[in-house]
């Protein structure tokens, strides 16, 4: 049995899909950039990496053909380094890290990299060709319910008001803007070569290194936005509270985490950053996709945290992905009843402000968590998210750099 520990982590800054700084930057190039950087930070020779697993929610076109293996080549890793792309939608990046941990724990490998990459600019939500199974669509239509519709369903079922959602979104942006201004993310971000064209058709190259999603907002401004997913003519009470302002942004980005067996790390003189102690996934009615963290976190606390002698009060930071404010508000409320401190949730803002590059988000949040714990000399953190198709995931991290 091995003992997996995290030795290094990094991520790109996150760009706005369709209109941001990374609209011409391929997802395989983003993945290659974080692969190069994470082995550099770990001080590991790429030839010693025994497997690379990357998450990608829409693995086709520019991020198809096993994008993890393509990225290995682009990163100039030896041909001997294998790679695999996996897809569990929004938690794909966290799932990839856990798969590497599980392989080390099983004694199959000593060094591996888990991460994720996604360009929502180049590959749209749902992919380029959506072909539902007609039988399933007729007999179980919620299998194909849109993410925006699930956000409206959660808001209606649990009475999450437009004002609550807008206030949550406003606070997310305020925290993220402050984090950017104070340089809280600078150490974890690897500068990413990118380019755009000016108004005269000239190619302008630059290094992209600051999350560009956070924007100044006010309750008045957010309140003027129209519902994005509901029929404006509908008379259904409570429908039409989800807007572009209180939803996560479509984004481009990548992240990577290098994991080693503890004995191997000690032998090589590497000081671990921390450890992913455990990981839980749950499933439920797809119509209510967003409630995932409210179910996955209790499962994690019971199965993983409790045996370690931990309760909700012992967790120093909660990174709960903000797919939509409606689901994030509900999850925080529900978990507060179990002992979660809402002041410890997304201290530097969340996906409403910082973006949600689907398959990369789990690796991005894991990296943010590890650096937040290190910077604040705190020990325990939980990363959690809802997942398309009616699922939720959560992972428990420990910081060793106290």
Image: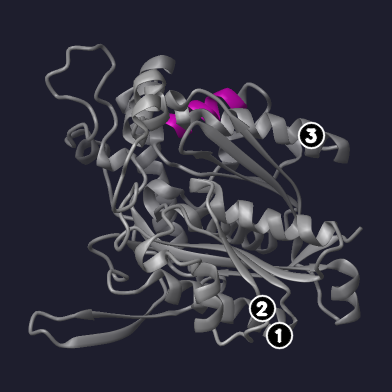
Could you say which quadrant of the image residue 245 lies in?
A: top left
Question: How far, Cα to Cα, is label 3 from label 2?
Answer: 33 Å
- Is the C-beta separation of discs 1 and 2 under 8 Å? yes
Main SS of the magenta part reads helix
Q: Say which mark, if any, is on residue 303.
A: 3
- Residue 23, compared with residue 59, is above or below; it is below
Q: Which residue is mark 2?
A: 81
At x 55%, y 73%, the residue is: 69
Secondary structure, mark 1, is helix
Q: Is residue 16 above or below residue 197?
A: above
Residue 267 lies in the magenta stretch: no
Q: How is the image coloured?
A: one colour
Image coordinates of residue 313 in percent, x first then y, are 73, 35
Q: Tell whether 235 sits left or right of 178.
A: left
The label number, if any, that marks residue 47 in the structure image: 1
Quadrant of the image containing the C terminus = bottom right
Of marks 3 and 2, which one's residue comes earlier in the chain?
A: 2
Q: Is residue 100 left or right of residue 270?
A: left
Label 1 vs label 3: CA separation? 36 Å
**Of residues 338 and 35, the one drawn nearer to the viewer in this rendering:** 35
Question: Considering only vertical position in the picture, is 132 above or below 232?
Answer: below
Q: Secondary structure at mark 3?
A: helix
At horizontal 73% and vertical 74% (from top left) the residue drawn is 50
Residue at 73% from the left image edge and 54% from the top image edge: 378
- Ranked by sequence position, the earlier of labels 1 and 3 is 1
């Amino acid at each position: 049995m091995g003992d997996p520990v995290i030795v290094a982590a990094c991520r790109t800054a996150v760009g706005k899909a369709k209109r941001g700084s990374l609209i011409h930057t391929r997802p395989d190039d983003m993945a290659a950039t974080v692969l190069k950087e994470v082995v550099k930070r770990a001080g590991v020779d790429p030839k010693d990496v025994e497997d690379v697993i990357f998450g990608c929610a829409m693995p086709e076109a520019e991020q198809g053909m096993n994008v993890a293996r393509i990225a290995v080549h682009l990163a100039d890793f030896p041909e001997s380094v294998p790679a695999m792309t996996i897809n569990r939608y929004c938690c794909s990046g966290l799932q990839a890290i856990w798969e590497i941990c599980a392989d080390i724990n099983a004694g199959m490998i000593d060094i591996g990299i888990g991460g994720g990459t996604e360009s929502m600019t180049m590959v749209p939500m749902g992919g380029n060709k959506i072909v539902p199974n007609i039988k399933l669509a007729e007999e179980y239509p919620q299998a194909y319910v849109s993410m925006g519709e699930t956000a409206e369903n959660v808001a209606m079922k649990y009475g999450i008001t437009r004002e609550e959602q807008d206030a949550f979104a406003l606070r997310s942006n305020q925290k993220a803007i402050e984090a950017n201004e104070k340089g809280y993310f600078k150490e974890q971000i690897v500068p990413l070569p990118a380019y755009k064209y000016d108004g005269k058709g000239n190619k302008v190259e630059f290094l992209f290194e600051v999350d560009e999603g956070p924007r100044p907002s006010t309750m008045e401004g957010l309140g003027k936005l129209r519902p994005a997913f509901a029929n404006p003519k509908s008379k259904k009470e409570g429908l039409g509270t989800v807007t572009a302002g209180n939803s996560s942004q479509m984004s481009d980005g990548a992240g990577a985490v290098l994991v080693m067996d503890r004995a191997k790390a000690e032998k090589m003189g590497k000081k671990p950053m921390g450890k992913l102690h455990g990981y839980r996934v749950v499933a439920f009615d797809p119509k209510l996709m967003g409630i995932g963290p409210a179910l996955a976190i209790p499962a994690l606390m019971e199965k993983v945290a409790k045996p370690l002698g931990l309760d909700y009060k012992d967790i120093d930071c909660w990174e709960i992905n903000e797919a939509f404010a409606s689901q994030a508000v509900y999850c925080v409320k529900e978990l507060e009843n179990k002992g979660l401190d809402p002041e410890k949730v997304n201290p530097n803002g969340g996906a409403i402000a910082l973006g949600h590059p689907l398959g990369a988000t789990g690796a991005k949040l894991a990296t943010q968590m590890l650096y937040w714990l290190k910077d604040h000399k705190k020990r325990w953190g939980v990363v959690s998210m809802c997942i398309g198709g009616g699922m939720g995931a959560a992972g428990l991290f420990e910081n060793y750099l106290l």
